[in-house]
Image (cartoon, helix red, strand yellow):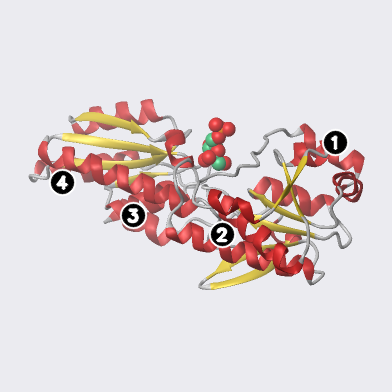
Amino acid sequence: MNACIATIAARAEKLGLEVRGIFRGLQGLVNADTIPIGVELEGLARRGGSFLGTSRNGRLESKLIDMGIEEAMKHCGVDGLIVLGGGGTLEALGKLAIGGAPIIGVPCTIDNDIFGTDYALGFDSAVNKALRAADEIMDTAESLSERVFMIETLGGRAGHMALETAYSAGADAVFVHEVEPGIDAAINKIKTKMDAGGTHGLVVLCENLGLESIARQLEEGTGRRIRITVLGHTLRGGNPTYFDRNLARQFGETAFDLLVSGETEKMVACVGKDIVSVPLEHIAGKKRDLDMHKYDFVNQR
Ligand code: F6P
């Protein structure tokens, strides 16, 4: 997100336009907590997250409804908004800003569940971290045999991160919220493989699925020791990958250009190799679908 903000600041400076950063998302918008930002931000571009911070507070949305988005923008001294946020934030803004408000959304979430874009900022960096962890764990798995390793990713209730990690790491099974977990099938698959001389098993699962209970069932079913790694918030930090930084630049440039050309209530999106824009109202109430081909490949291979 820092790379995206720095790109917007650089683009604005070229045109002689002033950019203000709003601290802590909707909280800063409601309270007019802003700071002028410029090209000096470039040094932050390699860092993950956003130096502006964020907020998770459902009450802010109703405050913004009472206030009116145009009024909040006036209060902050801005003529247009570029909002970097997850599905919830972008959807809320889409609902609030009915009638041509100068708002452009940039999809940002490691969960990658926003409808209308193949990628949200942060996802590639998080999956690469999870994959690196899986690779490192496999070094032990191959030398200390007869164990089943479980890796829990973040993702909220979206399985994209767990699935992409499992698919790329060559896991034996993946468990996600979108599909009823096939624990018996996973047990059979891992047991058959290990009985035939395979050194280890690897299972990746999304958070909030009942890790302990699944681990117990796998341990009983396979008769092998289970070792668990919870990756948690490590996945939300660190320097972003090339892909994410490049996408952040492209999203930042496109979002800025859309705003100055008078576009309203759009989200920038990556579809295939193209950077496009979609109306905010089109993403409301929808989620990006899980890739069922990859899910079946991991679990049925
Ligand atoms: O929505 C992004 C996300 O990283 C989820 O994957 C995760 O459940 C959550 O945020 C973690 O944040 P918190 O600590 O606020 O639950």
Q: Tell me the quarter of the picture where residue 10 sits.
A: bottom right
Is 164 located above or below residue 157 in the figure? Answer: below
Q: Nearer the viewer, mark 2 or mark 3?
A: 2
Residue carrying label 4? 193
Q: Earlier in the sequence, mark 3 or mark 4?
A: 3
Is 264 located above or below residue 54 in the figure? Answer: below
Q: Is residue 88 visible?
A: yes
Q: Nearer the viewer, mark 1 or mark 3?
A: 1
User: Around disc 1, counting alpha carbons within 10 Å, would you say few (fewer than 14), some (14 to 19), or many (20 or more)?
Assistant: some
Q: Earlier in the sequence, mark 4 or mark 1?
A: 1
The alpha-carbon separation of the residues under discs 1 and 3 comes to 42 Å
Residue carrying label 3? 167
* Quarter in which the C terminus is drawn: bottom left
Q: Position of residue 77 (x, y in %)?
A: 87, 49
Is 189 located above or below residue 268 in the figure? Answer: above
Picture disc at residue 248: 2
Q: Residue furthest left?
A: 197
User: Toward the viewer: 245 or 137?
Assistant: 245
The alpha-carbon separation of the residues under discs 2 and 4 comes to 42 Å
Q: Earlier in the sequence, mark 2 or mark 4?
A: 4
Label 1: state its secondary structure: helix
What's under tag 2, amino acid-wise?
Answer: Ala
Asked if marks 4 and 1 touch (Cβ < 8 Å), the reply is no
What's under tag 3, amino acid-wise?
Answer: Tyr
Ligand 1, what quadrant? top right
